[in-house]
Amino acid sequence: MSIRLGILGYGNLGRGVEASIKQNDDMELVAVFTRRDPSTVTINTPGAKVYHQDELENMTDDIDVLMICGGSATDLPEMTPKYAALYNVIDSFDTHANIPTHFANVDAAATKAGKIGIISCGWDPGMFSINRLYAHSILPVGKDYTFWGRGVSQGHSDAIRRIEGVKDARQYTVPIEDALNAVRSGSNPELTTRQKHLRECYVVAEEGADKAKIEEAIKTMPNYFADYDTTVTFISEEELKANHSGLPHGGSVIYTGTTGEGNKHVIEYKLDLDSNPEFTGSVLVAYARAAYRMNKEGVSGAKTVFDIAPAYLSPLSGDEIRHNYL
Amino acid sequence: MSIRLGILGYGNLGRGVEASIKQNDDMELVAVFTRRDPSTVTINTPGAKVYHQDELENMTDDIDVLMICGGSATDLPEMTPKYAALYNVIDSFDTHANIPTHFANVDAAATKAGKIGIISCGWDPGMFSINRLYAHSILPVGKDYTFWGRGVSQGHSDAIRRIEGVKDARQYTVPIEDALNAVRSGSNPELTTRQKHLRECYVVAEEGADKAKIEEAIKTMPNYFADYDTTVTFISEEELKANHSGLPHGGSVIYTGTTGEGNKHVIEYKLDLDSNPEFTGSVLVAYARAAYRMNKEGVSGAKTVFDIAPAYLSPLSGDEIRHNYL
């Protein structure tokens, strides 16, 4: 019997989860749930339904794990605890400062319901987090560095779009090669924000807009750009569509540690992703398998990627896993 | 209270484990156990004892986890099941074809005793294995590649030393840059053994030995060298000591996968290690913490790195782990 999944929220991440489910023979998408009028939403899975999210109250017998594909700012803090009272749930909550509260809220609801709620799943938080933990645990004397990119930051792209005279924009976060190389050499450099990443902005201006003013507004924007070396390139709407419509991303977690009489070790985990939402969705789906199986074994409450043994992610048996991967 | 460790076997790996224990405040080395006359063995930990391995029959109240630092060919198949009947144990068994038998033997002994036996721990098998599993589970459509080196292969160095006229030797396994780059590009190349790795040999010949004959014997040795491009460089004993006395190693697990409509993703886990035994020993020590804690929770039987949630490796609390690494 397949693991029956539901997707709540059908944006980029929801579609990434849907694409991943198709690659997993032991998984089945039952339905997509949306805040919108369901008749306006077309999905890519024949046989799966689209329902208004209010229907989630009535589907507990039909869905094993609910993939909550909302935003961290306002959706997930409300949705994940609410639905952890009804379903095993997975989310990708990434507002770091609020993780203790979110974890506690999901834990209370999930524990009471006998369900599992895996929060902060994806690649950062997620796979990058696991790699930081493994490295620190293996080599207690050392330091971790995280670089992001080259990839599109949705938050920074949105910030540019809010500037007067901007029609559309795409922002790439770019790790600085010299900084990467210094870290990989094991020299443990102290790096400022500016030394680690560049920000490349591709901007479509409205007709007659003051481009110099837009560029100035971007480069001086606090939190988003002021602390970085930022390039601004004005392009046409056609060029944006043709060359910047994808959502690539990636990055590296690099850990440099020391053992014995000064022996150095460098551990690097690196991702180079054509599609951030499809990769993130794929991570969520693998953890849905874990949530389902662990809950069948009687485990409940809030969990993160740290709490889940790798074997739970695989559809293979223990014998097969040892044969293929050990 | 500290986790009390014993080390069985005081070669390179045993010393690597000892070095790692010193970096972990929650760990304590109680004793080293040896087949040799204990009075001939000097260790680097003040306060720890050296005993003959027969004493292991009498130390079950004093040691929480026994680190079995023997060879995979003959030591571990016998030692690990034997001592899993008395202690939580960790080994680094790496004879891939014999893992099912070893796992079954350790599982039977450990289960009966209510102990945990973690087998095949280290970096390959070990951290590389985990990365293969995570990658295959996240991206079911894809392919993994493992490259080793640049690093010293003890087995290949030993094989050269057995050739007539060879006084000493050091063999480096070297990944071929073109192959690495082809894999990293996501092109999913089919690579032969020869296309993936070179073998560099540094050989000290005995006086008057026939160097051409030695070189021929190395390059045509089946299994070890015949399938590789191999370089042989004769050097003096002094040069071997000066430039080739370390045991560096490392390598990469690279996974290339596809999602959706042909989006490619490359995941790479890369190690660059000054000391193979110290890094391997550090992995074993982190898993000793996991064995101790899981056994306290009532878990027993044979385990591998796949079965152990990352959080068990860290001395930190769940809150601290989420705060520091998520």
Image (tube, coloured by chain):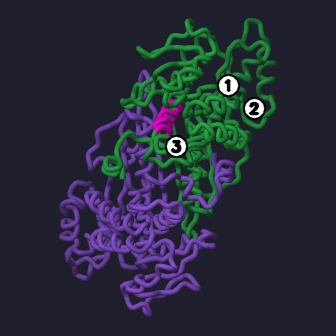
Chain colours: A purple, B green
| Identity of the residue drawn at 36% across and 38% down | A143
Element carrying mark 2? loop
Report, in whole angstroms, how far the alpha carbon at label 1 lies from the one at label 3: 24 Å
Secondary structure mostly seen in magenta is helix
Q: Is residue B112 magenta?
A: no
Q: Residues within 10 Å of mark 2 (few under 14, many from 20)?
A: many
Judging from the image, mark 3 belongs to the subunit labelled B
Report, in whole angstroms, how far the alpha carbon at label 1 lies from the one at label 2: 10 Å
What residue sits right under mark 3 in the picture?
A: B270
What residue sits right under mark 2 in the picture?
A: B225
Instruction: Spot the residue most to the bottom.
Output: A39
Position of residue B313 measured from the top left corner of the image (x, y, whole percent): 45, 41
Q: Quadrant of the N terminus of chain B?
A: top left
Judging from the image, mark 1 belongs to the subunit labelled B
Of residue B171 and residue A318, the one placed in the foreground of this image is A318
From which residue to which does the magenta span run?
Answer: B280-292
Q: Residues within 10 Å of mark 3 (few under 14, many from 20)?
A: many
What residue sits right under mark 1 in the picture?
A: B201
Q: Name which residue type carries label 3.
A: Lys
Mark 1 or mark 3, which has the lower sequence index?
Answer: 1
| Identity of the residue drawn at 45% across and 54% down | A127
